[in-house]
Image (tube, rainbow, N blue to C red):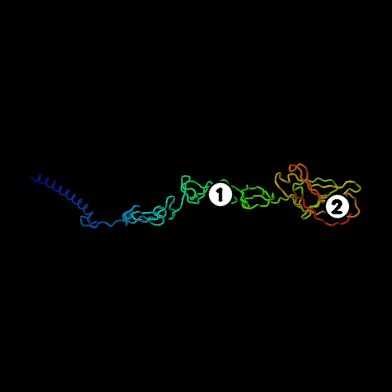
Amino acid sequence: MLRSSAVGARSWTIAVLGLAALGVAGSIVLACGIDEGTRPDGTDAAPPTEASAATDAEVPDHAEAGLTCRAGLTACGSTCADLQTDKGHCGTCERACTSGQECSSGACIDVCQVDGGTVASGAVDPTNACQVCNTAKARDAWTVLDDGTTCGAGKLCAGGACAAKCLIDGTLYDDGAANPSNGCETCQASVSTTAWTPRAESPLLTGGVDVTTQGWTIIQQAPYTLTYAADYTRLETSTVAGGRTSGQLLLAKSGAIEAGKPFAIRVQMLVESVSGPHDPLDAAVAIMGSLTGPLESTPSAARCSPSRKRRSAGPTTPSRPLSR
C-alpha cells in the first residue's frame, strides 16, 4: 500500500505540475493583451529596446493617414510621396504633372521619349549636336535644328549635321571657300562663322634675307651684285667695260602661286639709275614680273618704264606695284 500510494502521489504531483505549466502559459498569452508591464508572475516586463522601437516607427509608403512616413517621404493623404519625383505630388501634395511631363527636382518638366529613354525638353542629342528635344514639335523623336544654327566652336548645322562652315548674307559656305566677290577673302570658320576673313599674307620675298633660303633661284649674267641690307635686298647690274652687253639678274621661284587660287601680289621696291657720261647700255632699267606655268598659257608681265639718264647720282623713285 505504501508503495502504490507513493507512486500515485508521484503521478499526481507530475500532473499538477503539468497543469501549472499550462496555466502559466495561458496567463502569458492573456497578459499580452491586457498589460505588457506586468507578467503573470507579477514581475515587470522589460522596456522595449531601441531596435524594436525603430522597427515600430517604420511605416510603409502607402501608410494610413496620421502615420509618419519614413525619411525623405511626405504624407499626402493616405500616401507617403517623394515630392521630388512623384508625378502625382510634384513639389507639394496633390500637384500632379500633365501627360508628357515628368517630375524632376520637385518641378514638372516637358520631356521626350527617345532612344529608349527620357530626356528633358531642350536636351541635345549626345551623338549629334544638331538634334534636340523640342516638345513643341515632337515628343517621341529628336528635332533637327535649322541650318546655320551654332553647334560648337566654329561650327554650324547644315542638313542636320554639324560642320565647320560660314553663314554669310543668308548663304552657307564651306570652310575655306572664297568670297565670290573678293578672292582675297575666304570663309575661315575658326575665325568667324558670320563674316569673310582676309586671306593670310604669305611673303614671297623678304628684304634683307638671303633669297636662296627663301626658295628663290638666281639666274644671272655678269657683271652683277646682290647685296643685303637691314630690311631690303639690292640687285645691281652694270656693263662690261668696252663690251656691248650688260649684266642681268633674274630671281625666279617655282610654285609661288597655288594653281586655281585667286591671288594678289604687292611689291615694294626702289629703282635707282645714274646720269652722266656712260655707256648707253647702262641707261636702261627694266623691272619685270611675269607668271608662267599652269596659271595661264602665256606669260604676262608688268614693267616699269625704262629710264635713260646720264651718269650722276639720280633720284630714288618708287616703282609701281605689280599686281594680278
Distance from disc 2 to disc 1, alpha carbons, whole Å, reads: 63 Å
The residue beneath circle 1 is 146
For the point 75% across and 44% down, the residue is: 254
Instruction: Pick whichever of labels 2 and 1 is earlier in the sequence.
Output: 1
Horizontal side, residue 36 vs residue 223: left or right: left
Q: Nearer the viewer, mark 2 or mark 1?
A: 1
For the point 57% across and 45% down, the residue is: 159
Please tell me whether mark 1 sits on a helix, a strand or a loop. Answer: loop
Percent from the top left, x then y, of residue 94? 38, 55
Other-residue count near label 2 (Cα within 10 Å), few / some / many at <14 / 14–19 / ≥20: few
User: Looking at the image, is 273 positioned above or below residue 260?
Assistant: below
Percent from the top left, x then y, of residue 98? 42, 52
Q: Are marks 2 and 1 in contact (CB under 8 Å)?
A: no
The residue type indicated by label 1 comes to: Asp
Percent from the top left, x then y, of residue 157? 57, 48
> In the depicted view, which residue is nearer to us: 45 or 145?
145
Other-residue count near label 1 (Cα within 10 Å), few / some / many at <14 / 14–19 / ≥20: some
From this viewpoint, which residue is outermost toward the left? 1
Please tell me whether mark 2 sits on a helix, a strand or a loop. Answer: loop
The residue beneath circle 2 is 307
Q: Which mark is residue 290?
A: none
The residue type indicated by label 2 comes to: Ser
Percent from the top left, x then y, of residue 134? 50, 50
